[in-house]
Image: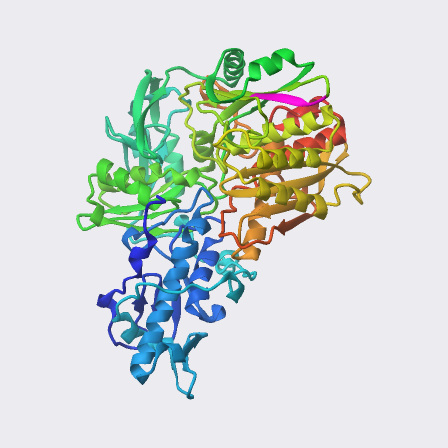
Amino acid sequence: MVGFSWLANLIPNEALARTGSANEWIELTGFIKITPDNQIKIFSPNPEFGTNVITSLPMMVAEELEVDWKKVIIEQGDYDTPRFRNQFTGGSQGMRMAWKPLRTAGATARQLLLQAAANEWNVSVTDLKASNGVVYHKGSNKSLTYGELATAASKLPAPEKVVLKKNSEFSLIGTPQKNVEGKKIVSGKSLFTLDYKQEGMLIAMAIRPPAFGLKLKSFDAAEALKMPGIKNVFDIQVYKDGYVRAGFDTRTFNNLVVVVGNTTWEVMNARKKVNVEWEPIESYKETVAAWGGKKEEMIPAGLESTDSHIKQMYEMQKKQGRVLRKDGDPETAFAKAKKVLERTYSAPFLSHNPMEPISCFAHITEEKAFFVAPIQIPEMMKQSITTNLDIPANKIEMKLARMGGGFGRKAYGHYIIEAGHISKKMKAPVKLIFTREDDMNNGIYRPSYMVTYRAAIDEKNNVTAIHIKGGGIPEGAIHENRFPAGAFENYLAEGWEIPSNITIGAFRAPGSNFIASAEQSFLDELAETIGKDPIDYRIELLKKAKANPVGKNNDYDADRYIGVLELVKEKSNWVKTNNKNARRGVAAYFCHNSYAAHVIDVSMKNGQPVVEKVVSALDCGFVVNPEGAKNMVEGAVVDGIGNALYGGMRFEKGVPMQKNFHQYRIIRLREAPKKIDIHFVQNNIDPTGLGEPPFPPVFAALANALYKATGKRFYNQPFINGLAKS
């Protein structure tokens, strides 16, 4: 997706370049529309699911366009890849990928408007100035609004090159701005897929196997079809046999029974009356084409359980793993070590649990396939729709509804295909709805992980080697080229995987959300073992990696890493805390091109942790909207604490043991930190992402604080289990 060019949509659309009434919109550069009476609308191209890109991305356009932000209309762009190109929210890439293209779009439109004014007055563009939606002539009192110039501007050829502002010249970017949809959200305006209605719309819900490792054998819907409001009960096959999946085509079960009726309540009740017979799956392989290559995925038969998973992972830890990276001679270093520090860390499957469960509206007709969907990556669904629903790409139309959270769950658009099948069958508009139980018990989950860290320590108390070995079900989490790689002459990373039929997918900061917890917890214990301050020890290692790096593939910037550690040390008063009752822990991590560090203060009350304060330091490059950035860090901190303390899915013979929030523990309002103090490293580096980087180090900072508060190290998530045994 990085290969897409966002600059293609800078060409004016001549079809829209016409003089009309005051409320007719004239398009400039695809992202901007202006009416003759000077209403200015900016489209946000990326789907919105809580990261506030719907505010921050248009700010980039508005800055270069030179308009009054308070008067601009912001609108969510619908699925239109030729027009918007990178319609992708995920991987903390939104701001990073849009930084120059969206500013260029604004600057291009401004230049077109200036040129139109220059042509009107027969003067040089250099004699003109644009400000707050008006073009002024410096040598006279002449002025024209953007609305008065828009028609003429839209007929001009786009300039080959425009000059973007220097960071020091920004008047909007870098200032805190409230969420442009904030009032709509709190007043209950129609924003989400569940809000969408259409005349004649039916409601659909699916029946899925009760356990992973089962598939549909047969069903009897006679009783359900007798119930009020029920239109039909039938089965669907989501993906065709032999379909080569794309990266986000993951789905849990391929054959579903569907109940369709007039209302949600009627369908929910009828669903209980369908008698379904299930049978075990057989092992099979699927081909997945993603990230430039193809691979085969093995899906094993059997009904899997958490207890057997843990035994399997411990067995894998005893075997030699696949070498991911090796520097120096770690075997000899360990053989000569005076002592070895070895610790094993584990984490369970996690459910995404966004506030809004899955839903999708679909209406398939001869003319078009229309969807309303909460999807993070709409363009990646095109292959699935065209192949599995037999719909030409030019007939796909999709309204991008606001998502009530996602965390990676809504990158996987199987529900769009499911809704499409149902609409085709019913020849009617249909809304497919997941209950909370449907969403929680049918994947897609964060994998289960295990990793062992070992450190060789010589007679002078120096660490001479690091060995990391770990994996997961069904994939591992080791990022072998990240810190502390590059800081030790002798370094070995090994990995392994255990296939599973439990479906997994990207979960906020994939892989990093576990390995950061293990790595940073281990470094904390290692620093204590050799008698060093945990922040100073990390900085020492990073300075070593900068001055004399080991290996050539280290994927972090030591200076930026050191920067967040020094900032959090200063802002937290690390050396001398003011809270005598709290104990503190620290962690720092790099992922998704940005750097984050947290210091967490914890006190214990009646055997339970109370998070008194969190101090966070972030380096995400230039901060476009400090208000939105602060919100994202706060959310990551609360989410990280909740998942670390309480999160976990257990399985018994393929059956998920947690059905809803009464069993799947999430953080409560009273358990959130009393205070979160956030600081950003000030620099002029282009934005490098923020949605995910603050999340992973929260786990370890909490674990390290809990150790100081209880005297016990926490190696296995969720930490609440360890507290209960304390």
User: Relative to residue 694, is residue 20 drawn left or right?
Assistant: left
User: Relative to residue 68, is residue 155 drawn left or right?
Assistant: left
User: Relative to residue 240, is residue 372 drawn left or right?
Assistant: right
From the viewer's side, name the closer residue of 484 and 692.
484
Picture coordinates of residue 470 (x, y %)?
52, 21
User: Relative to residue 247, is residue 608 drawn left or right?
Assistant: right
Picture coordinates of residue 633 (x, y %)?
58, 47
Single out the residue that lies furthest toward the left.
Answer: 366
**Which residue is rendered at x = 57% and y = 56% of the image?**
626
The magenta segment: 461-467
From the viewer's side, name the closer residue of 189 and 567.
567
Asked if residue 663 shows in the view, the reply is no
Picture coordinates of residue 425 (x, y %)?
23, 38
395 shown above or below 442: below
Picture coordinates of residue 121 (x, y %)?
32, 84
Q: Is residue 462 magenta?
A: yes
Which quadrant holds the N terminus?
Answer: top left
